[in-house]
Image: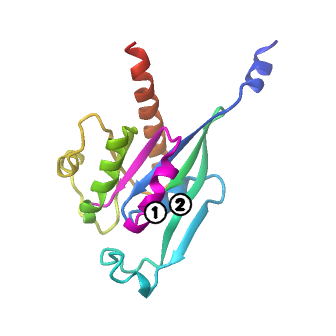
Amino acid sequence: MDFETTKAQRAAASTKIVIAGGFGVGKSTLVGAVSEIDPLRTEALVTNESEGVDDLAAVPTKATTTVAMDFGRLTLAEDLVLYLFGTPGQRRFWFMWDDLCLGAIGAIVLVDTRRLDDSFAAVDYFEARKLPFIVAVNEFDDAQRFGLEDIREALAISPHVPMMTVDARERESAKEALVRITEFALLQLAAPAASR
């Protein structure tokens, strides 16, 4: 059997990555920017019914919201395909997170420095479930810039958790975040085996 036949017979590995964070932080934007397929979006119009239920103050121009998930796909290498699942950011839809995270190897927590408080729930969620995650600070044009270590301290993020900045609108930036969580998750998954 020659090398090309062996290579062709090797099945591509696929894995699941979750993109989480607060309402309006850029999860749908990130999935859409990097997905090689038309992303599946479960969006609904933001209506007056949201008043008093969802905090729209920080995102007054947001017209739609994810009500179940976003789904996309990215082939990182010939034999590695990532399936991307964006979570809904509104508190009333958080009950879906457990199902969306089932089988995931890792997560990206997107952070908006204008609303750091909205990040605690996602960080706590992944820490409690011991699911490897990275923190990606989405650099909105009108957001004040802070050093990553300042943000780490403000959110009480463990020193071993990777942090980076990202522009969720830009394919290469979003792809870099996905590569980073994939590498980090694989290292974390290999760590227990190595210590045996």
Residue 6 position (above or below residue 129): above
Q: Please name whichever residue, 37 or 101, is drawn nearer the observer in this view of the structure.
A: 101
Q: CA distance from mark 1 to mark 2?
A: 6 Å
Query: Does residue 143 appear to the left or right of 170 in the view shown?
Result: left
Query: Does residue 99 appear to the left or right of 117 in the view shown?
Result: right
Query: Does residue 53 appear to the left or right of 44 in the view shown?
Result: left
Q: Please name whichever residue, 74 or 119, is drawn nearer the observer in this view of the structure.
A: 119
Residue 183's disc number: none
Residue 88's disc number: 1
Indicate the amino acid at tag 1.
Pro
Q: Disc 1, disc 2: CB below 8 Å?
A: yes
Residue at point 43% right, 85% down? 49
The location of residue 87, given as percent across then percent down, is 47, 58
Q: For the image shown, how many numbered marks are present on the structure?
A: 2
| Numbered disc 2: secondary structure | strand
The location of residue 162, given as percent across then percent down, is 33, 39
Indicate the amino acid at tag 2.
Met
Of callouts 1 and 2, which one flags the residue occurring earlier in the amino acid sequence?
2
According to the picture, the residue beneath numbered tag 2 turns out to be: 69
Residue at point 44% right, 23% down? 190
* Residues drawn in magenta: 89-113
100 in the magenta segment: yes
Residue at point 41% right, 63% down? 89
**Quadrant where the N terminus is found in the figure:** top right
Q: Please name whichever residue, 157 or 149, is drawn nearer the observer in this view of the structure.
A: 157
The color scheme shown is rainbow
**Quadrant where the C terminus is found in the figure:** top left
Q: Residue furthest bottom?
A: 48
Q: Is residue 171 visible?
A: no
155 in the magenta segment: no
Residue at point 18% right, 49% down? 150
Looking at the rendering, which quadrant does residue 120 occupy? Answer: bottom left
